[in-house]
Image (cartoon, rainbow, N blue to C red):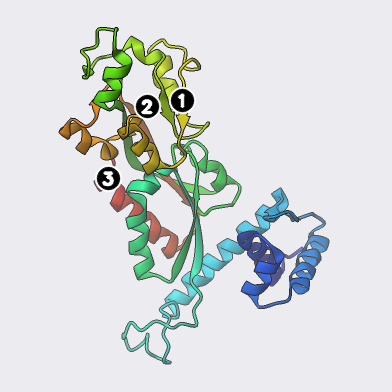
Amino acid sequence: MQIPLDLARTLAAVIDEGTFDAAARRLRLTPSAVSQRVKTLEQQLGRVLVVRSKPARATEAGAAVVRLARQLALLEHDALAEFGLDSDAAPAGAAAAGTGVRSASVRPVPIPLAVNADSLATWFLPALARVARAHPVVFDLHRDDQDFTAGLLESGTVMGAVTSQATPVAGCLVRPLGVMRYEAVATPAYVARWSAGHGDGGGTAPVASALPDWLAHAPLVDFDRRDHLQHDALEAAGFDPERAPRHFVPASNDFASAVKLGLGWGMLPEFQSSGELERGELVRLGGTPVAVPLHWQQWNLSSPLLDAVAVELAREARSALV
């Protein structure tokens, strides 16, 4: 049994665009033609490949076909690059002449990647910008907690992921990037307010081996309901993490802003708090800093383009992470 490549690409377009109509516009087909292609592929494989919802979702079988289509697109790009055809050259022979002129007729290859919010908000994008300047590529970024991004890689949703998982996903390569180091911090005004009556110095918090007792009942800031950094810090200090009131601020920069505005305390990475700590706008609350190791995992394909992404991410991580 063979999987017709044009049908696989059609299915991938439906999943990428979210609807049959949007896929039809991208492929320059009618929606009925797109639907017929997907039905034909389902009949040939004897599997339901797509959940016809809004947005459309790939079934487990469909995810395997989408993964194949994406791998083929990546390998096709790399093959064309060896012929000098990835450099968008408008005039015939321009690439061979070394002009560096790019042809508008070459469609950039899409690269879906998964990344955690703090990396996305700080060091991740400059690396992708360098890749995009050198190659015809567009990025489809999926944001999730670093403990869950490997699942997107395993399902075939993405080609590469920043993850806390050191063990390679089946069919993938892994390399260490570095460590994000988090500390419990808050504003001096927040400390003064919530430590009042607890003998904590009225406005400053000493660096200690454990979090202060008053923090067990003070408001904290969580990124979302998957964020366990504050929960684990309280638990390690012997407090009941469920008793603390909490705000949910599901964006990395906004999360840091909420802490810096005194909404609550939170675990911030060094590069989001070092300046404020030096200026006295934030203070350390104590407790053991949390080190979150990050790794880069990608499909185990011989792909210069995917390798270029890995090289730039490793380069950026060396300057940003511990």
Asked whether disc 2 touches disc 1, contact meaning CB atoms under 8 Å apart, the reply is yes
- Residue type beneath disc 1: Arg
Report the residue marked by disc 1. Answer: 246
Report the residue marked by disc 2. Answer: 264
Q: Residue at 38% across / 45% down in the picture?
A: 119
How far apart, in angstroms, are the residues tagged by discs 3 and 1? Answer: 29 Å
- Residue type beneath disc 3: Ala
Q: Residue at 24% across / 47% down in the picture?
A: 319
Please tell me which of labels 3 and 2 falls first in the chain: 2
Q: Residue at 69% across / 63% down in the picture?
A: 11
Please tell me which of labels 2 and 1 falls first in the chain: 1
Tell me the crowding category of disc 2: few under 14, some 14 to 19, or many 20 or more residues within 10 angstroms, Cα based: many
**Image location (x, y in percent) of residue 99:** 31, 86
Report the residue marked by disc 3. Answer: 320
How far apart, in angstroms, are the residues tagged by discs 3 and 2? Answer: 26 Å
**Left or right: 255, with 12 as reference point:** left
Q: Nearer the viewer, residue 103 or 46?
A: 103
